[in-house]
Amino acid sequence: MQLTKNLNRTYLLLATCLLLPCGSPPLIAAQHDKTNVVLILIDDLGWKDLGCYGSTYYQTPHIDRLASGGMRFTDAYAACNVCSPTRAAIMTGKYPARLLLTQWLPSGRWSPGKHKMREGRYVSNLPLEEVTIAEALREAGYQTAFMGKWHLGTETYYYPEHQGFDLNVGGRDFGAPGSYFYPFAGTWKIPTTGKIQQKPGPVGGKPGDYLVDRLAEEAELFIRRSADKPFFLMLSHYAVHAPLQGKPDKIKLYQQVAKDRQQGPPAYAAMVESVDESVGRVMQTLRELKIDQQTLVIFTSDNGGFAKATSNSPLRANKGSNYEGGLRVPLIIKWPENTKPDSVSDQPVISTDFYPTILAATGQPARPHQHIDGKNLVPLLTGKGSLQRDAIYWHYPHYNQHPHSFPSGVVRAGNWKLIEAFETGKLALYDLANDLGETTDLASENPAHVKKLQALLKTWQQEVGADPMRPNPQFTGDRR
């Protein structure tokens, strides 16, 4: 009986090998024919913080290699100039304004006496009624894991495990760790109340551990455990968000760079390099397991670079602002056998586009009622078509303490960008093709363009139910 069983196994193995084409990867890669997905989201990474985007200061060889193997987008945008709304847009395929989730959670920046307008309303948790991309893939048989910064809801009901992820490692309600060094705990002084919030460590570890490395370790472990099944991994680093804490040995190296050649503080540069190494670890794991060729990898940021951490030049402004420095982000997509290596797209794309793109790339049916604001990027990735979209929009009816920030609405159509300041009603128009740094307001010279774009913005605001700002009766300053 045992001999018969062994012979049967041998015949089955031989038959399987004969069916595989010459040069096929090991069986671990052939046990399923679906496309895996790895979505890597970095917090506060600026548009020019990578070597492949023009930085000569930050060392990012692994991310640059990722770009050389896929498509790099020059005109990719975050759905908001701060983190939580962008993350909600990625999860749902909807504009933050449609979700009524337009501010980071919790905001704590509005002052009843100092601010002329009342902020727009916003929900404090990503609604459970939304069918996230994780839920959609899990329904299709995918193993799903979230690692790192969540910042989309409170404990008990609104964590990643309630939004489609089988595994949650480090996803909490807060947006930054207490420390990047073990035990990763610390405190935060709430600006509006002065009270202290205690931040426990989001993951376990041991003395000497660095949070970026710990999340990379967990990502690698999940990939190895799930390699024989289709999986969706979202590696959402807390880095490179403040506190700016890099590894001491890396900081020393960047301190040796001349001040006039430093794009940001050495501690921030060290953090960027650690993030790059984490990407390298993930990609190396995929290669070792022979599943890199069946894995879609998306790498991006949730908003522009933080003013005190990096220079976004030639872009204007920084995180928290609706100028390009706050909205434009790096985006790299590697889809083996579908995307031409080292290709570049200048098509404007935005965070909402990931949801329908992932569904299409994994062979899942579209859910247009869910990802209503996203566009499928497959035609761009395969070079077989263009993106059919007239404009992209932003709605930020809030105050924050970042430089160059003010409540505003934005529309980009073609190379024209219109910004409407909600407090004053002032309209500013920029030609991004000839003025990437938004140095020259062309509104007075192009009234026809202003009128057209303002009409588009107003129509969109009504369509998505964008909540407006209203006069603040508690304001004690000059109302002019």
Image (cartoon, rainbow, N blue to C red):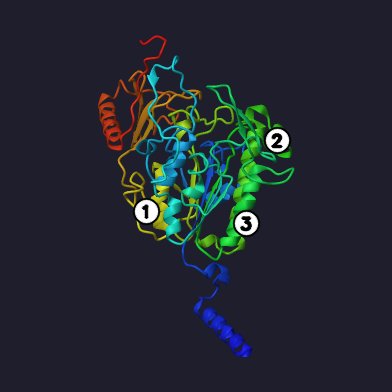
User: What element does badge 2 sit on?
Assistant: helix
Q: Secondary structure at mark 1?
A: helix
Name the mark on residue 221.
3
Binning the other alpha carbons within 10 Å of mark 3 as few (below 14), some (14 to 19) or many (20 upward) gives few
The answer to whether the residue labelled 3 contacts the one labelled 1, judged by CB atoms less than 8 Å apart, is: no
> Residue at position x 55%, y 23% from top?
191
Whether residue 382 is visible here, answered yes or no, is no
What residue is rendered at 65% in x and 47% in y?
214
Q: Quadrant of the C terminus?
A: top left
Quadrant showing the N terminus: bottom right
When the figure is inspected, residue 113 is found, relative to residue 25, above or below; the finding is above
Residue 379 shows which numbered tag?
1
Which quadrant of the structure image shows residue 51? top right
As drawn, is 183 to the left or to the right of 62?
Answer: right
- Please indicate whether residue 350 sits to the left or right of residue 50 in the image: left
Q: Name the residue rendered at 58%, 40% in the picture.
A: 238
Q: Which residue is mark 2?
A: 251
Query: In the figure, 199 relative to 420: above or below?
Result: below
The Cα atoms of the two marked residues, 2 and 1, are separated by: 42 Å
Dot 2 alpha-carbon crowd within 10 angstroms: few under 14, some 14 to 19, many 20 or more: some
Question: In the depicted view, which residue is nearer to us: 383 or 410?
Answer: 410
Could you tell me the amino acid type at mark 2?
Ile
Residue 83 x/y as whole percent: 49, 36
Labelled pair 2, 1 in contact (Cβ < 8 Å): no
- The mark closer to the camera, 3 or 1, is 3
Give the residue drawn at x 59%, y 90%. Answer: 4
Mark 2 or mark 3, whichever is nearer to me: 3
- Check whether the beta carbons of the residues at disc 2 and disc 3 lie within 8 A of each other: no
